[in-house]
């Protein structure tokens, strides 16, 4: 079998925002993103990997984390969200009605940060443009290459908030390209 993609889509949901109030002293600023992957008939989920890469700059609490080159966006010991047999990221699942449709998600941003963490930023490396993501579907070994990219989605987000009390905030999410299937060279 092989990993061939019929459709790979994403959807931005409304921003997950909570500002400090009389009950809570923290702020959450996150962009929920949902993905749907449909494999072509005859393809097998066991031959597919799903990985996400990121690059950009994150600032909060006076700390700066910069990812000038693409790095794997994974919290576990594996580099994949789906490794052909198990989910390690994206809170994913495959359809009960076959192994051809997967749904998974991401919600990058700040979660429960205190007032002293401001100003906060998720954006471009040189503080210009978007924090970028590439969500990639790859095929297992094809006899020549250990992993071959078969589809990807390229998207980004920008969070720039000076203060939850004084305003000065900008939030944006953007798809830079839609589903992008790749064909392997002969």
Image (cartoon, rainbow, N blue to C red):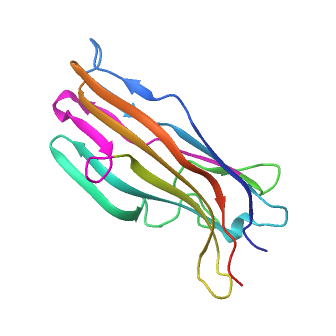
- How many marks the image carries: the answer is 0
Return the x and y of residue 41 as percentages of the image width and height.
Answer: 84, 62
Q: Please tell me which residue is depicted at 82% across the width and 49% down the height of the picture.
A: 97
Compare residues 20 and 24 and report the one nearer the observer. Answer: 20
Tell whether 88 sits left or right of 65: right
Q: In this view, does 6 lie to the left or right of 134?
A: right
Establish if 36 lies above or below 69: above
Up/down of 120 relative to 85, above or below: above
Q: Position of residue 69 (x, y in %)?
A: 35, 65
User: Does residue 30 appear in this view?
Assistant: no
Pick the front one: 25 or 30: 30
Residue situated furthest bottom in the rendering: 144
Q: Residue at x 26, y 11 (%)?
A: 22
Residue 31 in the figure: left or right of residue 7? left
Relative height, residue 67 to residue 114 (above, below): below
Q: What stretch is highlighted in magenta?
A: 102-128
The percent coordinates of residue 171 (x first, y second) are: 38, 32
Residue drawn at (28%, 14%), measured in percent from left and top? 21
Determine whether, in the image, residue 175 is placed left or right of residue 101. left
Percent position of residue 140, x then y: 64, 75
């Amino acid at each position: 079998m092989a990993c061939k993609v019929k459709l790979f889509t994403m959807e931005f949901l409304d921003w997950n925002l909570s500002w400090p109030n009389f009950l809570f002293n923290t702020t959450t600023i996150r962009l929920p993103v949902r993905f749907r992957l449909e494999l072509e008939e005859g393809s097998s989920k066991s031959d597919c990997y799903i990985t996400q890469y990121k690059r950009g700059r994150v600032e909060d609490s006076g700390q700066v984390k910069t990812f000038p080159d693409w790095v794997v966006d994974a919290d576990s010991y594996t580099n994949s969200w789906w490794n052909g047999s198990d989910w390690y990221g994206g809170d994913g699942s495959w359809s009960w009605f076959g192994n051809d449709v997967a749904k998974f998600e991401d919600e990058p941003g700040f979660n429960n940060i205190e007032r002293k963490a401001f100003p906060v930023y998720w954006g471009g490396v040189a503080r210009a443009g978007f924090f970028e993501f590439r969500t990639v579907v790859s095929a297992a070994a094809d006899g020549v290459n250990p992993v071959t990219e078969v589809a990807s989605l390229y998207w980004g987000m920008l969070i720039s908030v000076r203060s939850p009390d004084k305003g000065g905030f900008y939030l944006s999410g953007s798809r830079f390209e839609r589903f992008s299937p790749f064909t392997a060279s002969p």
